[in-house]
Amino acid sequence: MLKKYNRVILKLSGEALREPGSEDNISPEIVEGIAHQIKAAAQTGLEIAIVVGGGNLWRGAAAAGRGMDRATADYVGMLATVMNSLAVQSMLEAVGVPSRVQSAIEMKNVAESFIRRVAIRHLEKGRVVIFGAGTGNPFFTTDTTAALRASEIGADVIFKATKVDGVYDKDPNKFSDAVRYDTVTYNEALSRNLKVMDGTAFSLCQDNSIPIVVFDMTVPGNIQRALTGEDVGTIVCA
């Protein structure tokens, strides 16, 4: 049975924008494909906000492990997420979807500054809002950004697009007997140490009763199916 959502957050990893085996950090063709799926979902009246990671361009934790100051490395990563956000916005606009990028770090020449009430107004007017620059603070992941923004704008659910088709009891790439969950509670995910999101993000979702849907975005059409309420992946809920 289809689930009816009003307002959602789509969490995309930076790697999702890169074509496997390609030297391009951002694949216009892949981003265009994502944009078409978002367009189809938005045409149903769904209000869509997006949080994009920056791992295709930069990983702050990895740079810090090689001697860079961690806070500085994380700020570089935030700028990478803005680059990805602008790429997504460009393709959304190209396929006819009005959109806005809101950055947690002020950069008025390329993006709006994040203002909660303005973001909500954009969504109400049918615009897709892309949140860039993470939370604006080092040491926090874009998973945490998704959970924070979902809480702030009153999103019904977070869709976490991954390369696996849900949440498993162990790594399905390493264990052939790994079991996939259709539904799992927050408490079960914690007690079984299931790696749904990082701890801060997961706690925010649990505290604010925001369900998380983990699904495989590499399957053609799965982003659209997830956003429009089809049973795709694993639902983590109260």
Image (spheres, rainbow, N blue to C red):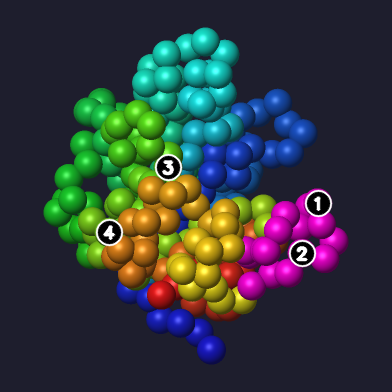
Characterize the local packing of mark 2: few (<14), some (14-19) or many (20 or more) Cα atoms within 10 angstroms. some
Q: Mark 1 to mark 4: distance in Å?
A: 34 Å
Q: Mark 1 to mark 3: distance in Å?
A: 26 Å
Eye-nearest disc, 1 or 3: 1
Q: Are the two marked residues, 1 and 2, in contact with CB atoms closer than 8 angstroms?
A: yes
The three-letter code of the residue at mark 1 reads Lys
Residue 169 magenta: yes
| Residue 17 horizontal side relative to residue 105, left or right | right
Eye-nearest disc, 1 or 4: 1
Eye-nearest disc, 2 or 4: 2
Dot 2 lies on which element?
Answer: loop
Q: Are the two marked residues, 3 and 2, in contact with CB atoms closer than 8 angstroms?
A: no
Vertical side of 143 occupied by 228: above or below: below
Characterize the local packing of mark 4: few (<14), some (14-19) or many (20 or more) Cα atoms within 10 angstroms. many
The three-letter code of the residue at mark 2 reads Ala
Question: Label 1: which residue?
Answer: 174
